[in-house]
Amino acid sequence: MERYIIKGGKPLVGEVVIGGAKNAALGILAAAVMTDGVCTIDNMPNVRDINVLLQAIQEIGATVNRKSPNEVEISGRGINPDDLTVDNDFIRKIRAGYYLIGALLGRYKKAKVVLPGGCEIGARPIDQHIKGFRALGAKVVIEQGMIIAEAEVLKGNHIYLDVVSVGATINIMIAASMAVGNTIIENAAKEPHIVDVANFLNSMGANIKGAGTDVIRIRGVEAFHNTEYSIIPDQIEAGTFMMAAAATRGDVIVKNIIPKHMEAISAKLLEIGAEVTESDDAIRVKADHRLKHTQIKTLPYPGFPTDMQPQMAVTLGLSTGTSMIVESIFENRFRYVEELRKMGSNFKILDGSTAIITGVEKYVGAELDAPDLRAGAALVIAGLAADGYTTINQIGYIQRGYERFEEKLRGLGGRIEKVDSDEELNRFIFSSGSVKKN
Ligand code: EPZ
């Protein structure tokens, strides 16, 4: 089974180029099936969750033409409206299959999609998605693990979300963009990828205003047309490399990003004593000394992102003093703490949602299991900062959301290799950080 082997203790130094935003791409690729025209989508991250969604899109008859690893053409022309069932073993494991409910319901007024999976970071209900579809006039039932949504006509409505949800905001926005009349979504999520999905829909002919604020106004249109679109940079991939620079006391320029999207992360890095320098489309993070403690609460954008919580925690675990992190979005996002303890960290979890972190001077290498996508990436950072060798199992989680992760880290001088046998692992250890595969 594939795992990472890491020889830690070396600061990351150099430049890294960030790819397209996975969580924007998932909404955009689903929405692309709403036209018989051709959507050419660039800067698409070539990661597992994306490839699973593309496969699901093909299975319902859409055309997917992969022009290069990061560029795809999609057309909904071949979709058979009489069979709009989305289900396979892979789509069951990802979260974003549910965007196909919004897309198919919007375009064809019906959809049957398997209940979403995704990382096990909490209960992750979808009641707000369903509330939105129902408000648009759809009948929605859950039968045998499938969500079945159907409407004679989708009609615009005024929808107030009871919780700020990224997924529900995107899903309702997608469906409402082809409803009759006007929709207002209140208490909408404001993440950069919501703006990106709205911009993509608008480029196909939708009429969406206010994305990026907490009130989104949508005037439904009858049909969409061809478009060419480039996905925004991935805020979380960028943040992960920024944190890797800080935790390893390195000096890294994170390129091809939108610095405005990184403000919550940059602010915390500055607060704990890292040097953070912004330019138009890059951020340099430098830390040549031990960083300080702080307090963090995860919040919807523009607050500190839950998807950066584990990476930040790993950094604080090496900082001076005692830090506190409150996780307010998902209830099960501290599962990496048990793994990190094996490296000599000092974390206490209170009531499941608060971590008290007493910084230690060093982590020591250990054998770890990645519990989910972002926690997996955080453990890689811990391994890069640690003394000695770390192995990380279950890296499939990490591959769901990070493209060529180990390659990009090696580009910064990180000694990390993906191995799939004990022999390869031993070869890495004997060669102290570089293994030549046969
Ligand atoms: C999206 O998940 C992302 N996933 C997650 O990224 C991210 O952690 C999360 O937003 C928060 O930023 C995708 O975009 C595919 P939510 P999503 O709906 O949409 C509650 C990663 O690592 N809620 O904003 O599922 C929910 O339980 C992943 O890339 C309801 O109560 O998150 C949570 O407490 C992991 N009812 C809160 O809202 C609902 O109907 C926010 O969830 C929907 C959500």
Image (tube, rainbow, N blue to C red):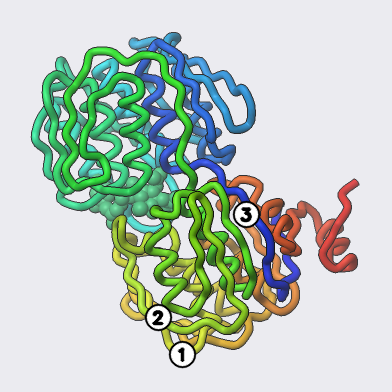
Q: Image point 45% across, 36% down: which residue?
A: 25
Q: Image point 53% across, 19% down: which residue?
A: 64
Residue under circle 3? 395
- N-term-proximal mark, 1 vs 2: 2
Q: CA distance from mark 1 to mark 3?
A: 31 Å
- N-term-proximal mark, 3 vs 2: 2
CB-based contact (under 8 Å), mark 3 and mark 2: no
Relative to 323, residue 177 above or below: above
Residue under circle 2? 294
Work out whether residue 400 or residue 402 is closer to the camera in this orientation and state it: 402
Identity, as a three-letter code, of the amino acid under mark 1:
Gly
Relative to 174, residue 47 above or below: below
Q: Is mark 3 within 8 Å of ligand 1?
A: no
Q: Secondary structure at mark 2?
A: loop
Q: Position of residue 1 (x, y in %)?
A: 71, 52
Relative to 93, residue 219 above or below: above
Identity, as a three-letter code, of the amino acid under mark 3:
Ile
Q: CA distance from mark 1 to mark 2?
A: 9 Å
Identity, as a three-letter code, of the amino acid under mark 2:
Thr
Look at the image and tell me whether residue 79 can be seen: yes
